[in-house]
Every structure is written in C-alpha cells, then in structure tokens.
Image (tube, rainbow, N blue to C red):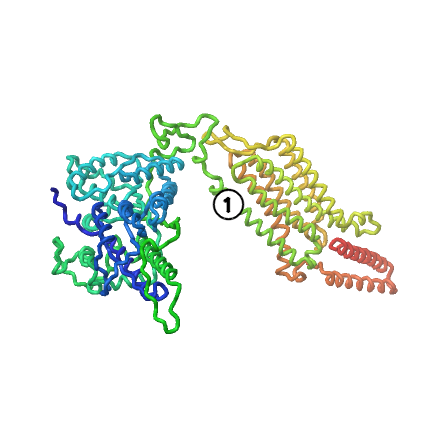
C-alpha cells in the first residue's frame, strides 16, 4: 500500500468559507423577526471526503440518524430536516440526489451543474443555485476570440460530463474559427488509495504537452483537476517515475483557462513551490454580491469563539501553519497556535475575506429554504392567535411540504479573473502578411495553413486588410471636416442672431445664409471620399462635390453682381435700376447651379462612376477606388467650377474700389484668389499621384478652398459684429445715421458754395465754384440713390 505524503491529507482551507457562509446566513435569519418568527433554524454538516462511498453514507446518515453537532447552539434539536445544500462537485450532487429525490427532500446544489442534470422531469426536488454551465462555454469562446487564440487544447474528465463538454466546445470553436490542437481526458474520481497507479497513468499524458504550438489550454472538470495537474508537473520534475526527465520542457508557460467549477486548491503545494506553473492563468468564477456584515463576521471568527465547531481547529492549524498543544494532527510544524490569529492575514489563495461565488450560492440557498418554510407554515396556520388566546403550536412540517417555484436558476452569473497581464499568442500559424492568402494543408485542421502569395489580380481577404478609418490621413481629414463644419455652423448662428444689424442687412442676408449652408455642405461632402468605395458613394462623390461648389460660387457671383448693379443704377437715367433686386440674385444662383446640375446628370446617365480595382499603379498593393467613368465629364465639372470662379473673381476685382460701405468685394476678391490658387495647384498634383494619395489630394483641396472662402469673407464681418460694435471701426459707415450725417455735411458744403457763387467775385473764381457745386450735387444724388437701393436690397 502506498504511503501518502502528509500534505495530501490536508483540508482545503479556501473551502472553509462555505461553512462560515452557511452559519452567517442562518444567524441573520434567526436574528430577523420577519422571517420564521419564534422559530430557530439549525444545521448539520457532513463531509463527503470526495469519496462516492462516503457521499452515500453521509446521505443515509442525514436521512435516518440525528447528529447533535450544532455550532453556537446548546438547545436540543427536533430533527426536522427541511432541505439539503450540496454538493460542491457535480459528481457529489449526483450521488446525493440518488437518495434525496426518492424522499422528495429539497436539495440545492451550490456548485456548477449541467442543465440536463437539473431537469425537473428527472429530479423533481433538485434545485441548481449556480449559473447554467452553457453560458460559461460561450464565455470561453468569447475570451479566445478576444485574444485571437485560434489553436487551443482541451482537458476534461473521462466521464459523461466531459464528453458533453467536448461535444459542445468543439462545435462552438468550429463555428468561431478556432481549432483544438489536442483533447485530453483525465481519470474521473481518482482516489489517494491508488496514487501510484494514477501517477503512472497521468505521467503518460505529459508528452502530449511537449512540442505543442498551442499556448492556451482550457481546463474543465472539478477542482481536483488543478491539484492533479500541479502534482503531475511537480512530481515529474522532481521525481520522474517513468525514467524520463521532463525538467525544462513541462508546460509551465501555458495559459490555463479554467472553468468556474475549478478552484486553485493547491494549499501546501502553493506554500512550498509557489504557483509559477499557473502564472498567466484565466479563471471564470461565479459572480457574487457581498452581504454588508459578512466581513465583520469573519473578523470575529476564532477557535475560542466557536468551540462547538468541529472543523475550526484543523482549519486553523492548516491556515496559519501552527499546531495546538493537544492536537493529534500529524506534521512537523513547530509553531504553536495562540488562537488570536486573524483570518484577514491569510493570503487570498488560501482564504478570502470577500464572499466567493460558491459561498454566495450557499447563502442564497439558505434564504430560499427559509422563505419557503416561512410561506408554507403561514399557509398551514391560517388561524392566528387573537386577544388573550395562546399562540397555536407550530405545525409539523415534512420535507415534501416545502414547495418552491417549478424551476429557477441563475441565467448569467460568471465573471472572469485574470492572473497574468501580457497575453501571448496561441496560433497554429502566424497571420499571413498582406499580399498572401491562406492555403489549406491536407490532413490538418483548417486553423493550420500555409501562406501563399496572391495571384495577379487578387488581394488578401477582409481579415488581412486594414480599415481606412484607422489611418492617419483619414483621421486628420475627418477631424478637419467636422471642425470646419462646426465653425461654419457657429458663423451661421452668429449671423442669424444678429440678422437685424446693419452689417448683416447690407450684405444681403438671404444670400449670406445660402452661402454658409453651401460651405457647410462643401466640408461635409469630403466625407464621401473616405472609406471603402461602393456604388452609392462613387455615384455621389463627384456629383455632390461639383453641385455644392457650384451653388457656393454662384452665390458669391450673385452677391458681387448685386453690388455692382446697385452702383451702376445710381446714375441718373440708368437702365440698370430694373435689374436691381432679390429676384436678380436668386436668378443668378439658380441658373448657374442648374447648369452644373445638368452636367452632373448627363455624366451619371452616360458614364457614371463605379467601384474599381487599380492593380497597376502600386506594384505591391491593389487599390480600391472609384473609377470616374468619363474623365471628360469630370474635367467638365471642374472646368465649369473654374469658369464660375473666374467670372466671380473678375467682377469682384472690378468692384474692389467701391466706397467703404460695400467693401465686401475686397474680401471676395481675396477669397477667390485663394480658391483659384488651391484648385490650380490641385490639377498637377492630382495627376502626379497614385492610390489613396489621389483621394487625399482632392479632400485637401475641398477643405482648403472652402476654408479660404469661409475665412476671407465671413471672419471680417464677425470681427465687426463682435469687436467694433457696428460703427466704431474704419469703413463701417453703413448705418443710416452715419450715412445721413455725411450727406448733411455734403449738403451744407453745397449751400455754402452756392452762396459764394452769388457774391461779386472774379469770373474765374465763379466758374470754378460752379463746377465744384455741380460735382457736389452729383455726389449728393449718388449717395441718396445708394441709400435707397441699399434699403431695397436688404428689405
């Protein structure tokens, strides 16, 4: 018979919190007068020792015997059991249910359990407190996809539950483009009595870890799997029993992904050799909330405070590495336990001060039983004591009389726990570089492939391409477009807010609004040039660009022509007066824009743009672009825009020396000079670039030319509105009061000249005075006409 080391006989200190959670929940219920008043809950605890035979024995003892070990309670018990909580593992829960469902004893499993096993048609008195395991499988797949792990290993138990896990996971992995490099089945229900044979068997599994590319390994089963794995690695390294020295080649660098059923119960192994083999592990765990007083409850736990607890002495010795003087625990520990040690000083791998997921399930199970008993007793005692009548006796309650909902379970309740920080790769092959495609290797899974160079005319699939929106040029272009659009909206709002001021009225409000809206569309139309080309975007790109710019230039032309016609109409007998007004300006905008719309419509009907592949410009790249369809029509659109810009520039240049009241022509002249400079530079640059640089050049030209128009035309007006208070700045004599004051001075000068002409002076002086007087009359009439026309234009 094999002699077992002492550390294999130790208890799992981490699981002692399960007992304390049970005690804490019962203590809360007994202190709560609203639940089971005048009734005290008690409990009995049995240990299955992870042994099927002991599980059957303790289940029978619980049903047919009455043990009196009840911590913190000295009163006797009546032996009325209303529910059972257990077990931690699925195997223990199975074996307990074999007996309890025959007697309709409510059983609550607080460990992870499969949905099929808790089906009400099979076990009518079984209730699962842990979340459904199926959601955990999906979470594992999401985790693998998040870290791009495509080549993984699977380890599970060699039983029905393990086969269900493999069948489910293999299907989910395949659906998500992930392959399993290997699947390993461990012996289920391994016992310490056969350690030598089990070690010999488990050592035979070690070669499967050697020379494997997969870094991520999913470990499914019970907590004993972690203990098995740690022991095998440790013993194979220190005491190789099979004659093979595995030192330096064991899988200590693997990323272990453990399910919620598995906990790191290494205990003495952790204290002696550490957890190097599990650094970087990822663990799913059951989600738990923290009861308010649980932490303070744990702080009060000590052997002296809970003398009736038969487990606390052994737990205390194992947790703190000490021994009591009267202890019978074997070991070589020299330190004596004082009893004043505190649980919060124990490292979290050995004991946690926060309630764990399994403890939280036990806590909820106790409350579920208490509420069910409370409801059942109230239903069985409809007649309550009245007046001086004595309280009726508590009715006798049988286990099958305690009813719960037909079915209840936690659907979602898993969270992940990260032990490492730097995620490694777990691939059968490296990713293929751009310009290469995956080529299947015969006889291997689809995750293993060769990278073959793409043939001519072909490019890598979507997984090998990079989104255009992630590039620096795209980010800068999009940011600039939105920023300039925001500035345009602010300027438009500013003009709408001050629409009744003289500076806004004098510049034709309606045309100003149209110009600002067209500039806004100019900035936004640049977004059509960013991203993967498709049919709709290709049709809209150039047509939208040409149309909105034509509206913008037509509006500028209409504003400039209106000013020139207003001055020409001031001459006596001028025929231009009938052309002055709002209709003339709107006619110019509509006519010039419709011509461009006709050109674009003809382009789209005859040779519309379409998505295309450029395989010749770049030797190592295939460029997805919009083929213009007809280059002639594209240059017709640009040519018409150039014509509008040239005419507007010429008219504005001729009107630049008009009086200060109409100095907008100066700003229009400069803005159109910037506009023309940008687009003249665009043509040679556009023709000399290839690929995405062509699109970047056009986007830059759109944004730069539009920004030039916005800044040169509207920023001076915004300055006048906000800084100069409308009349204090030079050249802002637009207000009627200022203009009438100037006319009054001019009229006074004319009257003085007239009086001077009547005086007896020399003929030459009289002749000069008459000429000067005639000039003053002409100027006076011109300014009067200007004021009248300005009022007519601005409404």
Of the pair 194 and 518, the residue shown nearer to us: 194
Q: Quadrant of the N terminus?
A: top left
**Between 539 and 570, which is closer to the camera in this rendering?**
539
**Callout 1: SS:** helix
* Front position in the image: 546 or 446: 446
Residue reaching furthest to the bottom: 388
Is residue 134 depicted above or below 684 in this figure?
A: below
Horizontal side, residue 481 vs residue 508: left or right: left
Q: Residue at x 66, y 62 (%)?
A: 728
Q: In x, y percent, where is residue 118?
A: 34, 46
Q: Is residue 136 visible?
A: no
Instruction: Residue 74 in the image: state x and y as whole percent.
Output: 22, 65
In this orientation, does residue 616 appear?
yes
In which quadrant will I find the C terminus?
bottom right
Q: How many residues crowd around disc 1 within 10 Å: few (fewer than 14), some, or many (20 or more)?
A: few
Residue at image location 41% in from the left, 27% down from the top:
453
x, y percentage for residue 348? 26, 54
Where residue 319 sits: x, y (%)? 20, 56
Quadrant of residue 68 within the rendered picture: bottom left
Q: Which residue is mark 1?
A: 476
């Amino acid at each position: 018979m094999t002699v077992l080391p002492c550390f294999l006989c130790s208890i799992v200190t981490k699981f002692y919190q399960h007992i304390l959670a049970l005690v804490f929940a019962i203590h809360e219920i007994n202190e709560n007068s609203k639940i089971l008043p005048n009734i005290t809950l008690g409990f009995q605890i049995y240990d299955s020792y992870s042994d099927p035979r002991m599980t059957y024995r303790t289940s029978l003892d619980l049903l047919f015997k009455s043990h009196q070990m009840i911590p913190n309670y000295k009163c006797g018990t009546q032996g009325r059991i209303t529910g059972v909580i257990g077990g931690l593992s699925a195997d223990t829960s199975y074996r307990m249910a074999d007996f309890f469902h025959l007697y309709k004893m409510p059983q609550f499993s607080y460990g992870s359990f499969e949905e099929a096993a808790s089906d009400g048609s099979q076990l009518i008195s079984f209730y699962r407190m842990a979340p459904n395991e199926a959601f955990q499988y999906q979470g594992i797949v999401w985790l693998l996809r998040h870290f791009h792990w495509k080549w993984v290993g699977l380890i599970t138990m060699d039983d029905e539950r393990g086969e269900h896990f493999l069948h489910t996971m293999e299907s989910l992995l395949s659906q998500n483009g992930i392959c399993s490099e290997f699947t390993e089945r461990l012996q289920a229900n391994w016992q310490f009595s056969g350690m030598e044979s089990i070690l010999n068997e488990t050592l035979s599994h070690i070669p499967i870890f050697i020379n494997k590319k997969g870094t991520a390994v999913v470990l499914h089963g019970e907590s004993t799997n972690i203990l098995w794995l740690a022991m095998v690695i440790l013993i194979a390294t220190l005491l190789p029993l099979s004659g093979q020295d595995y030192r330096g080649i064991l899988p200590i660098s693997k990323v272990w992904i453990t399910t919620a059923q598995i906990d790191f119960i290494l205990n003495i192994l952790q204290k002696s050799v550490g957890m190097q083999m599990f650094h970087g592990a990822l663990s799913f765990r059951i989600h738990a909330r923290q009861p308010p007083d649980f932490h303070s409850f744990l702080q009060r736990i000590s052997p002296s405070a809970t003398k009736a607890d038969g487990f606390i002495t052994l737990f205390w010795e194992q947790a703190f590495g000490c021994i009591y003087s009267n202890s019978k625990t074997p070991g070589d520990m020299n330190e004596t336990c004082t009893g004043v040690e505190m649980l919060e000083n124990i490292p979290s791998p050995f004991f946690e001060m926060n309630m764990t997921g399994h403890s939280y399930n036990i806590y909820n199970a106790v409350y579920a039983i208490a509420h069910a008993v409370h409801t059942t007793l109230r239903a069985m005692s409809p007649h309550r004591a009245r007046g001086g009548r004595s309280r009726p006796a508590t009715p006798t309650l049988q286990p099958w009389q305690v009813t719960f909902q037909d079915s209840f379970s936690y659907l979602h309740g898993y969270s992940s726990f990260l032990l490492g920080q730097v995620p490694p790769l777990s691939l059968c092959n490296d990713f293929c570089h751009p310009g290469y495609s995956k080529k299947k290797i015969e006889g291997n899974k689809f995750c293993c492939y060769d990278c073959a160079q793409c043939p001519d005319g072909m490019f890598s699939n979507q997984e090998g391409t990079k989104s255009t929106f992630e590039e620096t040029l795209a980010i800068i272009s999009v940011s600039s477009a939105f920023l300039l659009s925001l500035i345009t909206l602010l300027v438009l709002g500013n003009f709408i807010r001050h629409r009744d001021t003289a500076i806004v009225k004098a510049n034709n409000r309606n045309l100003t609004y149209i110009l600002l809206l067209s500039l806004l569309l100019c900035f936004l139309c640049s977004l059509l040039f960013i991203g993967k080309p498709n049919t709709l975007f290709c049709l809209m790109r150039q047509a939208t660009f040409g149309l909105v710019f034509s509206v913008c230039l037509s509006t500028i032309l209409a504003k400039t022509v209106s000013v020139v016609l207003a001055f020409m109409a001031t001459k006596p007998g001028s025929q231009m007066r009938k052309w002055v007004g709002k209709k003339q300006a709107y006619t110019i905008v509509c006519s010039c824009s419709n011509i461009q719309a006709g050109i674009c419509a003809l382009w789209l009907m005859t040779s519309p743009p379409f998505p295309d592949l450029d395989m010749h410009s770049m030797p190592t790249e295939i460029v997805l672009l919009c083929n213009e369809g007809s280059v002639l029509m594209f240059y017709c659109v640009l040519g018409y825009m150039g014509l509008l810009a040239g005419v507007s520039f010429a008219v504005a240049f001729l009107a630049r020396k008009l009086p200060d009241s109409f100095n907008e022509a100066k700003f229009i002249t400069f803005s159109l000079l910037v506009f023309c400079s940008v687009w003249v530079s665009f043509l040679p640059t556009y023709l000399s670039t290839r690929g995405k640089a062509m699109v970047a050049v056009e986007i830059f030209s759109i944004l730069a030319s539009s920004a030039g128009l916005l800044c040169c035309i509207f920023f001076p007006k915004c300055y006048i509105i906000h800084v100069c208070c409308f009349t204090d700045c030079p050249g802002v004599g637009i207000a009627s009061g200022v203009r009438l004051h100037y006319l009054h001075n001019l009229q006074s000068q004319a009257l003085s000249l007239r009086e001077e002409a009547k005086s007896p002076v020399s003929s030459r002086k009289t002749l000069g005075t008459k000429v000067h007087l005639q000039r003053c009359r002409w100027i006076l009439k011109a300014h009067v006409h200007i004021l009248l026309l300005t009022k007519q234009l601005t409404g």
